Image (tube, rainbow, N blue to C red):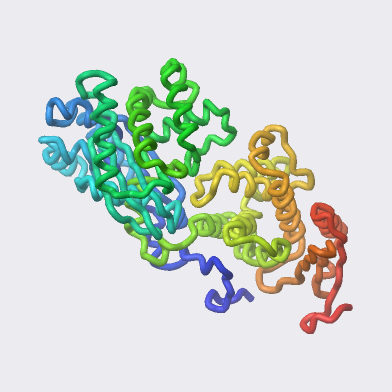
Amino acid sequence: MNQQPETIDWGPFGRPLFEEAAAKGLTRVGVIDVGSNSVRMVVFDGAARSPAYFYNEKIMCALGAGLSETGHLSPEGRVRALSAIRRFAALAEGMGITPLTAVATAAVREASDGEDFREEVLRETGIKIWIIDGNEEARLSAQGVLLGWPGSYGLVCDIGGSSLELADLADGRVGRRLTSALGPLKLREIKGGRKAVKAYVRETMEKLHAEMGHETGMRLFLVGGSWRAIARVDMERRNYPLTVLHEYRMTAHKIAKTAEYIRKSDLEELRGRCNISHSRMSLVPLAVIVLKELIRVFKPKDVAVSSYGIREGMLFEQMPRELRDRDPLVEACRFAEAKDARLPGFGRIMYDFVKPLFPRANWQRKRIIKAACLLHDVSWRAHPDYRAEVTFDNATRANLGGLKHYERVFLGLALMNRYSGKATSGRFEALIGMLNEDQIKEAAVLGKAMRLGAMLWTNIDEPPGTLQWSPKSAQLTLKLTQQARPLFGEVAEARFKALASAMDAEGHVKFTRAPNGKSS
């Protein structure tokens, strides 16, 4: 008989909140972002704290093209944007997710015909667009960053087509915000060529720094398509093996080298290699000027790319405080387990089983171990010959928040060891090379421990045994109850020996009489 939720010890990460009524209301949420350069609809689905992208479509409309000269929206962009929103409204109706939450940013709020466009959209599609000011845009973008990094500190910089926003983060809260006209579409309309653009950007950035009053040495979070395009080129220049933009890290030195690389490259050829749209690539040289000045003036200690921005911030806005503060990685993995595992709830038992092997793990390492245990059985439907590779691909490339790139590889390697006694693959060699020898060994130990643990349970209520690890004497002991004796067959014994070998340990198996625990 399964335990009632209130009697279960959920451990340091708490009870999974996506089961609560407040979170279930966020199971599927649709948002539209009407930007100066693009119009996008995103439908979030799944665990509310770290949702999957059920649907994601973007149309490059360039609503803000020519705005500085004409004072109104691009006529061609307006037609394309209205057509895109009609399509999104029809899709939302078919998905059963109406009403959509829609916001418009710099182009619509600044254009003389912005309100007229808003009324036309409402009349034609029934969608009400909220035109937000620069400070609200900055706040929502910063909240998008918090969706992936709860408790973050530093500076968020969101670049759009017509504007650039800054927001301060401290203790997981959004502080001071500023907006400026440093969007590439606006900069493209400055007279006087590249020299005039650079002078304008420098003057504006120094004013922003003075108004923000921000100390140097903070973390800089980059939000926006132009920043992501630059990061993708940086990956290409470095031949970086993991082309996941979220949580990608850059330094001032690397950004300077990439800026020079872009300047010397054929943009069309580079665009093709990096799979960047033509309209986006045309704005990259101007965005590079802005980024170099941003780095020069604010002097961040490191730079992190965030794929989460205003749309994710709109979702974050709808979450209760308790849900906002939860770990996005653990919540997403719990949802995956509940949806796909053969024995949902077993991940919690597995975590308790393997954690004695990692007595020095800090909270950051514990959450990765927890994630691995929750995901250890979600790929069972894959063909047995490919499960190890599938789990590695899923972990390294999945849309998961709260994971550094090397942690993705560690998680993937641990899961590969869970499914294969020989967790090696030539096509993953470059990715595994992102880990040091100790990390590779630790991932192997975790994976082999999960591989053993998967043999020893038939339900989630009665753990049949425990692992005990004595590092000083290099003794690994598996204690099993008498009831578990039939489970410890040849395969389980071989897996225990493989685990002991991976730990350079001497392995022992003891059987105890439940419940007094005396040796049999």
Residue at image location 52% in from the left, 68% down from the top: 14
What percent of the width, then of the height, locates residue 51?
45, 52
Apparent side of residue 117 relative to residue 368 in the rendered image (left or right): left
Is residue 375 toward the left or the right of residue 424 in the image? left
Give coordinates of residue 327: x percent, y percent: 49, 59
Quarter in which the N terminus is drawn: bottom right
Q: Is residue 118 above or below residue 343?
A: above
Would you say 465 lies left or right of 35 here? right
Would you place residue 438 above or below residue 117 in this image? Answer: below
154 or 101, nearer to the observer = 154
Q: Position of residue 223 (x, y in %)?
A: 38, 41
Give the residue furthest to the bottom.
516
Q: How many numbered markers are drawn?
A: 0
For the point 48% across and 37% down, the residue is 251
Q: Residue at x 24, y 23 (%)?
A: 196
- Kindly tell me whether residue 89 is visible in this rendering: no
Write the residue at 22% across / 27% down.
Answer: 65
Q: Nearer the viewer, residue 414 or 404?
A: 404
Screen quadrant of the C terminus: bottom right
Residue 118 as seen in the image, left or right of residue 257: left
Quadrant position of residue 345: bottom right
Q: Nearer the viewer, residue 367 or 272?
A: 367
The answer to whether residue 72 is visible is yes
Q: Is residue 431 above or below residue 470?
A: above
| Residue 224 locus on image (x, y percent) | 36, 38
